[in-house]
Amino acid sequence: MEKGKKILVANGEKKALKELFGCSYPTVRDALNGKSSTTLGYKIRKLAIERGGVEIDLKSSDLKRK
């Protein structure tokens, strides 16, 4: 996962991922926010996408701050 990319998931998915991997909420949050480069972080991101998560590029011009 490249820097600046984040995975958005549906309500309840972070909790489901936390329970599936037996890890803490901050671990899931950091993985989905692209702040984790561990094997577990990669697995969390991969499964999140398989379960309907959407990867967005925070550097995209479509997401300019007002």
Image (spheres, rainbow, N blue to C red):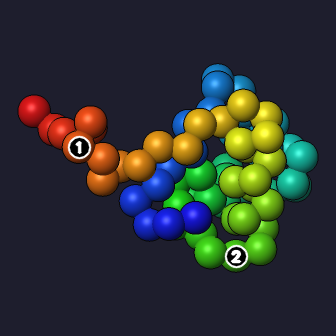
Instruction: Classify 62 as above or below 22.
Output: above
Tell whether 63 sits left or right of 2.
Answer: left
Q: Is residue 18 above or below residue 16?
A: below
Residue type at numbered disc 1: Ser
Q: Nearer the viewer, mark 2 or mark 1?
A: 1
Q: Position of residue 31 (x, y in %)?
A: 62, 59
Q: Amino acid at mark 2?
A: Thr
Residue 13 appears at what percent x and percent y? 72, 33
Q: Which mark is residue 38?
A: 2
Residue furthest left as drawn: 66
Q: Looking at this view, is 29 or 32 the one in front? A: 32
- Front in this rendered view, residue 13 or 55: 55
- Tag 1 secondary structure: helix
Q: Residue at x 50, y 66 (%)?
A: 2
Q: Quadrant of residue 62?
A: top left
Q: Is residue 26 visible?
A: no
Q: Which residue is mark 1?
A: 61
State the quadrant of the N terminus.
Answer: bottom right
Which residue is at the far bottom?
38
Residue 52, image x and y in percent? 72, 31
9 sits to left or right of 62: right
Q: Position of residue 50 (x, y in %)?
A: 79, 40
Few, some or many residues within 10 Å of mark 2 (<14, 14–19, 20+): few
Q: Quadrant of the C terminus?
A: top left
